[in-house]
Amino acid sequence: DWTVLDISEKMGAEIPEGIKFICCNAENVKLPDRSFDFIIIRSVLEYTNEDLVLNEAKRLLKEEGYFVLAQKVMDGYSSDINLILELERLRNPLKKNLGFMSNLVKQVAKTGLRILNSRTYTQNYSINFDKWLSRNDTINLENQVKLKKIITSLNEDVIQRTGLKLVNNVLYSNLTWAIITCHKNSYVNPNTS
């Protein structure tokens, strides 16, 4: 059985039939301990208290449960971090910068979950520029003008490093994702290590 948790009731309407939906805050899920065999958290930590969410995920995992964290990170933008932070600030002032993969690994490790694997991968992303610019009509006009000016004035070196380019009203970019896979049971058999 699959269960989706999201803070937005609107998201519940997007969930396919047969999948349970619970509208709640990921920092405080009103379910009993050890409710799930497997938990996936994707693009949540930048809007929440990371420690609370990660510890809540651990609480909700069964003893032999697995946890996968997928978050966008700054690893692919080290030369252009200030540019990316400015774009994020203009598009979504509530979104926190989670930094680099190493930051997430440290945060997950603090929970006591056993990290089985951690890696980054780059996603070649594209979106209609007008849709990206307005973010479903949530970005004010002043910020839209600033965003458009930044994107349309990128030099070739920045385009090469970030993948950020505007072609025929489509915005392309390279997003770097951190994927961390964990197991709740921290016991490691000494005969297998």
Image: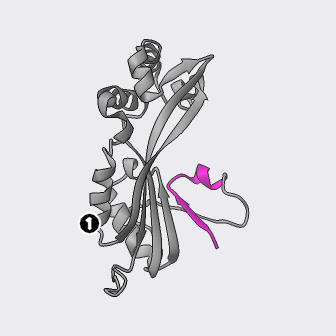
Q: Can residue 52 be seen in this snapshot?
A: yes
Query: Residue lying farthest right?
Result: 17
What element does badge 1 sit on?
A: helix
Q: Residue at x 31, y 86 (%)?
A: 190
- Residue 172: percent from the left, percent from the top? 54, 27
Q: Residue at x 38, y 37 (%)?
A: 76
Q: Which region shows up in magenta?
A: 1-13
Residue 22 painted magenta: no
- Residue 184: percent from the left, percent from the top? 39, 76
User: Image quadrant for the C terminus?
Assistant: bottom left
Task: Reply above or below: 161 against 15.
Answer: above
Task: Reply above or below: 83 against 176.
Answer: above
180 sits to left or right of 40? left
Front residue (pair 174, 191):
191
- Residue 5: percent from the left, percent from the top? 53, 61
Residue for badge 1:
110
User: Tell me, what colour scheme is on the image?
Assistant: one colour
The amino acid marked with disc number 1 is: Lys
Front residue (pair 19, 165):
165
Q: Can residue 32 be seen in this snapshot?
A: no
Residue 12 painted magenta: yes
- Residue 41: percent from the left, percent from the top? 47, 59
Task: Reply above or below: 170 against 181.
Answer: above
128 sits to left or right of 44? right
10 sits to left or right of 80? right
Q: Residue at x 34, y 71 (%)?
A: 113
